[in-house]
Image: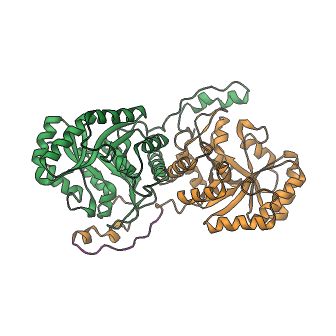
Chain colours: A orange, B green
Amino acid sequence: MSVKRRDFIRLAGAGALAAGMPAVASVPVSMPEGHANDKFKLAIAGYTFLKVGIDDALAMMKRVNINLLGIKDFQLPYNSSDEAIAAFVAKLKDNGVTPYGVGVVYMKSEAEVDRAFEYAKTVGVNLIVGAPNVDLLPYVEKKVMQYDIRLGIHNHGPDNPLYSSPDDVWASVRDLDPRMGFCIDIGHTTRLGQDPVALARKYHNRVYDFHVWDTDQPVKAGKCVEAGRGIIDFPAFFKTLRQVGYSGTVSLEYTKDMNDPLAGIAESIGYFHGVLDG
Amino acid sequence: MSVKRRDFIRLAGAGALAAGMPAVASVPVSMPEGHANDKFKLAIAGYTFLKVGIDDALAMMKRVNINLLGIKDFQLPYNSSDEAIAAFVAKLKDNGVTPYGVGVVYMKSEAEVDRAFEYAKTVGVNLIVGAPNVDLLPYVEKKVMQYDIRLGIHNHGPDNPLYSSPDDVWASVRDLDPRMGFCIDIGHTTRLGQDPVALARKYHNRVYDFHVWDTDQPVKAGKCVEAGRGIIDFPAFFKTLRQVGYSGTVSLEYTKDMNDPLAGIAESIGYFHGVLDG
């Protein structure tokens, strides 16, 4: 029987229908087998919504049925009052969305580190996706221990010498608190000519988030395209996440058509679901 | 190496990049391996665009990178002049879109059969997706032979006693010209409690088009949902099309959110690509 839900025939009752018997009225919709059970969760990185307001962003998330958001500071500035943060988080909740982290947060001073951890604590998340200056990492480690909030350092590929690659991140955090690890951006690793699947396999124990998007070229000039239209091997990527039992977030960061991103977001999310079912 | 394109490293040159050498400037974007080589083609059935004009429809097709359209009569009425048909087809071509067929065309008289074949001939397609009254089939067969245009009879599930199931179609066409066969609508077979994968395997030799969409329930009340969110086993469906070497069209017919269908079209098309890559 070639249907996803093994109770198809039992519930649908082709025989019952043929015999004119009433069909079962209500069959719950479910995600495909082997997909809803994955430990990792699809999410969206807030930068995706750079050119649209939070109301439109939440409508788009509802449309594509994704309920985890990484909050970016243009959505909720770092200097927001506690009341403003509470109101923002309440708005997300009212729309069925939960923040899974904040970031990418750049930190160039101890004061910015302090602010980032207070901000994450007030938002109520236990993950900062960030890029602290390397010389601040010992100070960041104290904050990680004090707040019990993880730091996933984001690699930015050929655009930025600060953590270009996950290897750079690893060199900086390997001897620090294990709550300091990675947000591996697989588009940027690809633009650096590095295989994101191998990197996911190598570093998965310290990865707390992935930024996922497809790119058309494995070079600095590589641009974001709808997932599946580019060169990244998402089937191998997701297979690896399953094999290693990755349990963090996998967050679409879509930066094509930023003034009108819904179609590309939807195609990308649909592609991920298809790969995960396929 | 876990990348889709085996020339990734050769072209990207991780070593070259690390050594500061210039990266290869241009790498052509390609569809994933094993996907561009499929004999069947993804398309969109015109009914998807019932509530949007042809300009918006063509813009949506461009957005999701699908270039085969099944023309529905609300887009191009059957009584259009030859000049109007030529202008319509030219508009499609100007937008990179090719018509793969026309339909669904209902035919309740010999005059309507005549009109349908003239219409298809003038459009320039060799496929009518249609539902002629059963008693007209001998007359339709003469037209099929005269025009060398195929007829794919569309099953409409529990909504319509005329060709409810592909089995009904088969009973009507099995002894007729082999150019008379199926457009199997897999959403409607599922709403009838019949497994579309088994039907695709059974009848593939006479199938010229599939109408594909997902449904939330295997009963008459089943509604269209974004592909992947419902109960149809698309991985098994596409696997079967590959196994049997199906070489026709696989046409999304998306009928949710018809006033604003782009997001659902994009998610569905992305899902199909993901399944085909996965």
Report the residue at 31% width, 46% height from top. Answer: B72
The quadrant of the image that shows the N terminus of chain B is: top right
Does residue A63 appear left or right of residue A146 in this picture?
Answer: left
Report the residue at 14% width, 49% height from top. Answer: B174
Quarter of the figure with residue B16: top right
Percent x, y for residue A228? 52, 43
- Between residues B73 and A95, which one lies in front from this camera angle? B73
Percent x, y for residue B97? 39, 36
- Between residues A111 and B52, which one lies in front from this camera angle? B52
Report the residue at 82% width, 60% height from top. Answer: A117
User: Is residue A43 placed above or below B269 in the rendered structure?
Assistant: below
Asked if the magenta segment contains residue B82, the reply would be no
Q: Can residue B162 be seen in this view?
A: yes
Q: Is residue B247 visible?
A: no
What secondary structure is the magenta-colored segment mainly? Answer: loop
- Between residues A76 and A200, which one lies in front from this camera angle? A76
Q: Give the range drawn in magenta.
A: A19-30
Percent x, y for residue A116? 81, 57
Does residue B9 appear left or right of residue A149 in this picture?
Answer: left
Total numbered labels placed on residues in the image: 0
Percent x, y for residue B251? 36, 47
Does residue B138 appear left or right of residue A200 in this picture?
Answer: left
